[in-house]
């Protein structure tokens, strides 16, 4: 059954052949929800990149892991992202989160599904999303990560579980240093006791952006402590 948000989105943005970025109509757009011209402007994450967090790395380096991941333990197995957080994709994500454009989840979700299939990144038992604090959810009206996670779950036939809860109202992460982000997120998440079925499982955690990895890592640590066997991460961009 479709959620109220999903049904509402179909009313305000029903046409699959309209580019969600520039508004042009083209029959070849289909379920990609973006035109060829706009898609060409988006920077993709391409090899070589860190095997742990997908950070782009310089050619010629004899390592497969970046300095950040080598110098600090990450609790997730790996984090993958199809796009670089720059230019057009950065603007689209900002609009998605802060300018009341929840329908962008279709373009982002479709892109993530294609990327996952192309990279065989789909062997998970459950799909989870990074939660918003209740106050922010009320203000925004939707959780962008949840919309993405449910889209992926529906297209991949992997069950979505609303397992994580944000217990602490954190301040905005984007303006903080890595250490400040980590401090800001400490004890900010917990796993709902109703989510016992995710114990001893492999889960995919969905979020919008990977920057320092603090959010993904804190969520992963909480999930592992709860009894999840392995946590994998995917974001739109990094």
Image (spheres, grey):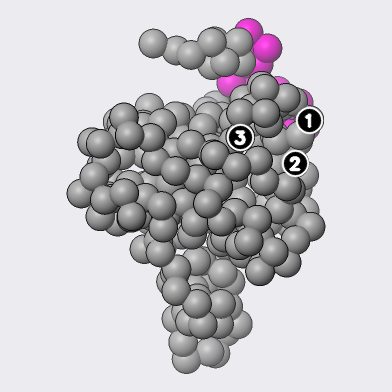
Q: Is residue 34 magenta?
A: no
Q: Position of residue 101 (x, y in %)?
A: 71, 27
Taking depth in this image into account, of 44 and 181 the one nearest to the observer is: 181
Q: Secondary structure at mark 2?
A: helix
Please tell me which residue is depicted at 69% across the width and 64% down the height of the picture. 180
Label located before the other in sequence (1 or 3): 1
Mark sitting on residue 99: 1
Q: CA distance from mark 1 to mark 2?
A: 7 Å
Left/right of residue 21 with respect to residue 70 in the rendered view: right
Give the vertical position of 210 relative to 179 (above or below).
Answer: above
Give the vertical position of 162 relative to 216 (above or below).
Answer: above
Toward the left, the furthest residue is 200
Q: Position of residue 173 (x, y in %)?
A: 71, 53
Q: Identify the residue position indicated by label 3 in the image.
A: 133
Q: Which label sits in the foreground, 1 or 3?
A: 3
Q: Position of residue 39 (x, y in %)?
A: 66, 45
Please tell me which residue is depicted at 61% across the width and 34% down the height of the picture. 133
Let me know if residue 83 appears in the view. no
Q: CA distance from mark 1 to mark 3?
A: 18 Å
Let me know if residue 2 appears in the view. yes
Bounds of the magenta segment? 11-25
Q: Position of residue 157 (x, y in %)?
A: 30, 31
Q: Secondary structure at mark 3?
A: loop
Magenta part, dominant SS: loop
Mark sitting on residue 94: 2
Q: Secondary structure at mark 1?
A: loop
């Amino acid at each position: 059954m479709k959620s109220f948000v999903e049904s509402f989105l179909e009313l305000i943005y029903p046409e699959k052949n309209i580019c969600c970025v520039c508004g042009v109509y083209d029959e070849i757009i289909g379920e990609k929800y973006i035109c060829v011209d706009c898609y060409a402007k988006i920077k993709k994450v391409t090899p070589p990149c860190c095997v742990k967090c997908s950070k782009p790395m310089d050619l010629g380096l004899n390592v497969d892991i970046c300095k950040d991941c080598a110098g600090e333990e990450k609790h997730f197995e790996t984090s993958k992202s199809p796009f670089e957080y720059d230019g057009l994709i950065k603007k689209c994500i900002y609009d998605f989160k802060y300018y009341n454009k929840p329908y962008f989840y279709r373009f982002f979700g479709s892109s993530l599904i294609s990327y996952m299939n192309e990279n065989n990144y789909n062997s998970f038992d459950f799909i989870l999303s990074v939660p918003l604090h209740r106050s922010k959810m009320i203000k925004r009206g939707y959780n962008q990560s949840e919309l993405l996670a449910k889209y992926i779950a529906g297209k991949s036939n992997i069950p979505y579980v609303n397992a994580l809860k944000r217990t602490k109202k954190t301040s905005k992460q984007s303006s903080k240093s890595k250490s400040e982000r980590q401090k800001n997120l400490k004890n900010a998440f917990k796993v709902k006791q109703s989510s016992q079925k995710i114990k001893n499982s492999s889960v995919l955690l969905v979020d919008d952006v990977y920057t320092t990895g603090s959010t993904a890592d804190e969520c992963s640590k909480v999930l592992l402590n709860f009894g999840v066997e392995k946590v994998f991460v995917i974001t739109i961009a990094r």
